[in-house]
Image (cartoon, coloured by chain):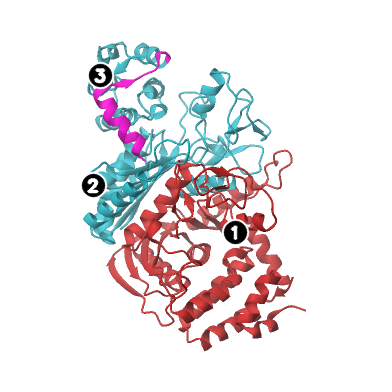
Chain colours: A red, B cyan
Amino acid sequence: MPRVDAGLFTHLVEKAFDRAGLAMESRRHVVAAMVETSLRGVDSHGIQLFPHYMRALKAGRINARPAIQVERSRPSSVLIEADHAFGHHAGSFAIERCGELARDTGVGLAAVRNSTHFGAAAYFALQAARDGNLGFAFTNADALVRAANSSSPVFGTNPICMTAPMEGEEPFCLDMATSRVSWNKVLIHRRAKEPLPAGWAADAAGRPTSDSEAASMLEPIGDYKGFGLGMMVEILCGVLSGGPFARDILPMYRAPIEVRRSISHFFAVIRIDSFAEPATFRRRLSDLAQSIRSIEPAPGSPQVMVPGDPEKAQYAQRLRHGIPVDSAKWEELITVEPALEESVLK
Amino acid sequence: MPRVDAGLFTHLVEKAFDRAGLAMESRRHVVAAMVETSLRGVDSHGIQLFPHYMRALKAGRINARPAIQVERSRPSSVLIEADHAFGHHAGSFAIERCGELARDTGVGLAAVRNSTHFGAAAYFALQAARDGNLGFAFTNADALVRAANSSSPVFGTNPICMTAPMEGEEPFCLDMATSRVSWNKVLIHRRAKEPLPAGWAADAAGRPTSDSEAASMLEPIGDYKGFGLGMMVEILCGVLSGGPFARDILPMYRAPIEVRRSISHFFAVIRIDSFAEPATFRRRLSDLAQSIRSIEPAPGSPQVMVPGDPEKAQYAQRLRHGIPVDSAKWEELITVEPALEESVLK
């Protein structure tokens, strides 16, 4: 399995996007987000998306020269028209506006419409946490998660992401889909011809299934609770922003590549100093995290961790030893951009 | 099973709290919250808590004459010292401040510390939605939910509540604990000597168990995801407000009744008109809800509903036919306040 150097990969992909005519700010954010996400170990949302993004850019689904604009603003909120920009660019624009609003009022919110796939929500919320704030990021996605009791999916994996600064380490970061697992995990079981664990997926009639071939949709976490959280995210994203929502959102891969999807996102930044002394907050949160990490695991369970811990460990490891890319994905990457061969660590 | 008239019960309990010296604003909110919560069918957080609340009030855990105060304020946020008031009063004070801030800036946030049990989170978030806004309410609670992989509970059932106004019906209302089920459901199985469904609870060593006698803590929804959501709620509540958090919070029943628990809450109100035309938003949300309700159920499943639907049905039913109270709870209620006999429907 090739291992890729994060710095070299960044440089080469930036150049490829530059040749494709992508605006500098879009380029910067989509590449930084992909690489950071892969370094954090979240392969499904990292550099392996480069071929898809390049195709979507060339086909016009993603706008190479977007005019991202604030359409409505109040002292603590903005509504943003993303003009079909890379979601990574639109989201970074939005979380930055949230930070500016929060400086003045204590909090900033942004609803974004007419955007595209934004990668991992953590990329945005972590920007807020590195500035010393609480960050939140949400996005809608095409219908894939079964509505409680129903025979069909309504909401996407609609993630919830929250970050908070900690003392002496990278921020706390919860970034989770509201489905039990990702569709990618179902596909991995399908390829390996392995049965699915209970609670992961349902067949086309909405019946729980352990047959990876029959799996047609994902199950939400906690049944109607995860479904409710998915609806909460959709209200904040599609319903509030004025964009399409739920079953009106086109699928990322199965829709024609030139068709625009009009994804919606929602972001929030909260200033900690509105409520607490920031240093005290960071220390208290670190103390809480340490107390959790020191709990005895249940019999047969691995080490107890807090959200973000696995990603912090991966980051340190991959920054030194490179980002592993599976062979099939690697073939796809170098087909789109042969120069990427140069980023492989010997 | 006696059925209680909501209006008469309200009147009689208000009188009982009045005689106990409880301040008018506290009285009004705790009684309205208990009755509304029971009407919505959420018995665990409704009128059956009256005996506990009266004992806690008389013992001094709950302050009969609280001086609730804003300790820090910014244009979109307040930090509130609740002075050990009824949580229902502190929370209503907080969500009202949030609404005022949101009128000026688009959003209002409130962190509340030194409060007490606030009942159902929906009571507060629904106030915001009835004013035409999005409402959010969160609270911490004593450790009861197992941390992922661990042998012990860290966070409470730390609920997430979100509301939004709809066209032609009561607001959307998601109000859910981040545990798979409530402890009350475990107790019901224990009394009936029935095994627990998989994924509900763990024994004292943190091992999953179906033995209702051995159950010692609850499991979070979606394993590490629900645990992460519980931590998100605790960061917003205890960590941000400066109050105690996680395993430092005393249990509601097992701690001496005179001891103050210093519960923390967090609230948010978002003005819809910061992002969308309110009428358009309400119509789009109602359309989404109708499209969900019209989905064919999975084989063997009941009707497909959206969050809040079961409670709306109960409300209509119980307003007309009274609130049913189980016999053991009823004995407790009339022991504390014999006059409540008058509220029973013949």
Callout 3–callout 1 Cβ contact below 8 Å: no
Q: Which mark is residue B54?
A: none
Q: Are marks 2 and 1 on the same chain?
A: no
What residue sits right under mark 3 in the picture? Answer: B12
* Residue at figure coordinates x 43%, y 79% from the top left: A60
Work out whether B35 lies above or below B223. Answer: above
Q: Is residue B324 magenta?
A: yes
- For mark 1, give the secondary structure: helix
In the image, A133 versus B275, the foreground residue is B275
Q: Which residues are magenta?
A: B308-328
* Residue at figure coordinates x 63%, y 77% from the top left: A333
What residue sits right under mark 2 in the picture? Answer: B131
What residue sits right under mark 1 in the picture? Answer: A184
> Separation of disc 3 and disc 1 at Cα?
58 Å
Amino acid under label 2?
A: Asp
In the image, B214 versus B197, the foreground residue is B197
- Relative placement, left or right, of A227 versus B154 is left
Quarter assignment of residue B31: top left
